[in-house]
């Protein structure tokens, strides 16, 4: 058993996306705050967010926003959390404006607001057309770097929660080739989603579910692990590599339509809201059309708009498609569903508090219950802001009464047996396994078979000596995958993103 170096903070935040950075900025300037980034600061999904941020501002009907959120979430949302999200959304927008975010405005000087799927009115604010996440991240990073009490630590890997009698005492990390224990009065997990568990995902390659895996090992309560959202329109390519480029829902919000391989519009067969139905419905419809036409994609048609409008409104999408030989003002865009967002995660209350004392979670890794079984488009950034600020306010009160002397001062790293397993192959196998068995449509028998495979791998690798961060990532991925599979088998529901197709003797029964 070996000891390691240590460093003390008041608050340690795992994750430097919008959730983590905003929470850090909302904390008192008197607190010593560490923000941990697994890789580069901009290597996160927040930076890629295109569509915008949903907010009820000025004279908007806030109950309509609540209704839309719950309808998209298949009516299993936490109503109290939804009301908090909507009622505090205007304050969050004001905070961003105060920090320096310049939202797009119309010719009258008002916020330009657009439609997206299942929104009853235009309420999506954006920056520079389809670069909202990038613009917000740049402001938050600049603010955090210029705030003296915040220390941003890039290229650091959070390994595990350190606890003493169910009280979080800090985070064990691996930094510059050595173990470093970051002691803290409070810790916040803001580590993002789980997209890399799937072979088709819009998520960046760092999102391997590390924060959730840490919570699993610390026996922190999780919730809604079966609810995974598949975005209907990722740009189809024969080479998906580590992530797929997202064609924002805002394109459909502006009027683009879906057509199958034969050039026929098809959404009217599935939902009266057509292209603006909730994402789970549109994703299943596309999947069905791909199966019926024996194709790997359908088309998104935006050719009803002039080149100048598309290039201005969707500059990032326009350029990406152009790089792929697609002129979206005259060519159809080939699209396919891909894993996009995780509604489940670490169970938290309305102030981001997890089941372990002094531990918080915000952003995609947290489950507030606000999204239900299927997230309403553009509610995710707002969730990170609203509940990040609430967590910060609660932490301020919490740190005042925490006695640091009661914490464990030494942490030991176990030395385990050697391993000779091919972790790259294990990772590739898991991504395919999850894609085929825990995707848009799931079958009970296949899910059970997937569980057997995951359990077998976990049995083999749980006691080995990990030689690299990549190997720890794979272990984390398998632990999170098992939790998702178990939650799916236990819930046996067919709502939102957890759509189970069960075999009977003569046919297939949709439940």
Image (spheres, helix red, strand yellow):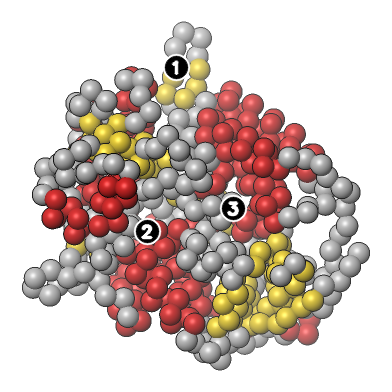
Mark with earlier residue (3, 1): 3
Residue 39 placed where, x, y %?
57, 64
Question: Is the residue marked by circle 1 packed among few (<14), some (14-19), or many (20+) residues within 10 Å?
Answer: few
Q: Which residue is mark 3?
A: 209
Q: How many numbered marks appear? A: 3
> CA gap, disc 3 to disc 1?
33 Å
| Residue at the disc numbered 1 | 508
- Quadrant containing the N terminus is bottom right
Say which residue appears at 82% left-offset and 48% top-offset. Answer: 464
Q: Who's the residue at 60% across and 75% down the image?
A: 153
Which element type, helix, strand or loop, lies under badge 3?
A: loop
Instruction: State the SS at label 2.
Output: loop
Q: Position of residue 184 (x, y in %)?
A: 68, 78
The answer to the question of whether label 2 and label 3 lie on touching residues, with beta carbons closer than 8 A, is: no
Q: Quadrant of residue 461?
A: top right
Question: Can residue 16 be spotted in the picture?
Answer: yes
Closer to the eye: label 3 or 1: 3
Apparent side of residue 264 relative to residue 232 in the rendered image (left or right): left
Left or right, 437 with reference to 272? right
Task: Characterize the local packing of mark 2: few (<14), some (14-19) or many (20 or more) Cα atoms within 10 angstroms.
Answer: many
What residue do we see at 73% from left, 55% from top? 468
SS category of the residue bearing label 1: strand
Q: Where's residue 157, x and y in %? A: 66, 64
Label 2 – label 3 distance at C-alpha: 19 Å
Toward the viewer: 238 or 186? 238
The furthest residue to the left: 108
| Quadrant assignment for the C terminus | top left
Q: Nearer the viewer, mark 2 or mark 1?
A: 2
Point out the residue furthest to the top here: 506
Q: Which residue is mark 2?
A: 49
Disc 3 + disc 1, Cβ < 8 Å: no
Answer left or right for 384 relative to 3: left
């Amino acid at each position: 058993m070996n000891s390691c170096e240590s460093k003390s903070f008041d608050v340690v935040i795992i994750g430097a996306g919008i959730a983590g950075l905003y929470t850090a900025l909302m904390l008192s300037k008197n607190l010593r705050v560490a923000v941990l980034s697994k890789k580069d600061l901009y290597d996160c999904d927040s930076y890629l967010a295109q569509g915008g941020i949903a907010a009820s501002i000025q004279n908007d009907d806030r109950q309509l926003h609540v209704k839309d959120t719950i309808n998209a979430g298949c009516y299993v949302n936490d109503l109290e959390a939804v009301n908090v999200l909507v009622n505090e959304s205007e304050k969050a927008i004001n905070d961003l404006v105060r920090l320096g975010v310049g939202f797009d405005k119309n010719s009258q000087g008002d916020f330009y607001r657009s439609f997206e799927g299942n929104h009853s009115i235009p309420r999506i604010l954006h920056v520079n057309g389809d670069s909202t996440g990038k613009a917000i991240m740049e402001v938050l990073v600049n603010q955090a770097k210029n705030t003296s009490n915040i220390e941003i630590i890039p290229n650091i890997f959070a390994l595990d929660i350190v606890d003493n009698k169910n009280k979080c005492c800090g985070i064990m990390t691996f930094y510059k080739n050595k173990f470093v224990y970051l002691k803290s009065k409070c810790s916040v997990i803001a580590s993002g989603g789980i997209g890399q568990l799937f072979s088709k995902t819009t998520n960046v390659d760092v999102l391997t579910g590390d924060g959730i895996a840490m919570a699993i090992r610390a026996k922190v309560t999780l919730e809604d692990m079966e609810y995974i959202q598949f975005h209907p329109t990722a740009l189809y390519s024969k080479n998906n590599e580590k992530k797929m480029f997202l064609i924002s829902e805002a394109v459909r919000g502006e009027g683009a339509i879906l057509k199958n391989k034969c050039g026929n519009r098809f959404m009217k067969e599935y939902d009266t809201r057509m292209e603006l139905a909730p994402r789970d419905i549109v994703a299943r419809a596309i999947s069905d059309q791909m199966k019926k036409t024996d194709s790997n994609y359908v088309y998104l048609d935006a050719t009803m708009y002039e080149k100048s409008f598309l290039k201005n409104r969707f500059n990032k999408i326009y350029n990406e498609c152009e790089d792929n030989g697609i002129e979206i003002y005259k060519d159809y865009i080939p699209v396919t569903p891909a894993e996009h967002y995780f509604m489940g995660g670490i169970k938290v209350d309305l102030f981001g508090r997890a089941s372990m004392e002094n531990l918080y979670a915000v952003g995609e890794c947290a489950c507030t219950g606000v999204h239900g079984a299927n997230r309403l488009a553009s509610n995710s950034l707002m969730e990170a802001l609203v509940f990040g600020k609430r967590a910060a306010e609660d932490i301020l009160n919490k740190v005042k009464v925490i006695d640091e002397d009661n914490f464990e001062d030494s942490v030991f790293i176990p030395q385990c047996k050697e391993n000779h397993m091919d972790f790259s192959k294990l990772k590739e196998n898991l991504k395919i396994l999850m894609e085929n068995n825990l995707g848009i449509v799931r079958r009970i028998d296949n899910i059970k078979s997937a569980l057997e495979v995951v359990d077998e791998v976990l049995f083999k690798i749980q006691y080995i000596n990990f030689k690299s961060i990549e190997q720890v990532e794979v272990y984390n991925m398998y632990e999170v995958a098992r939790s998702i599979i178990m939650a799916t088998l236990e819930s046996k529901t067919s709502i939102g993103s957890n759509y189970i197709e069960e075999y009977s003797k003569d046919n297939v029964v949709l439940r």
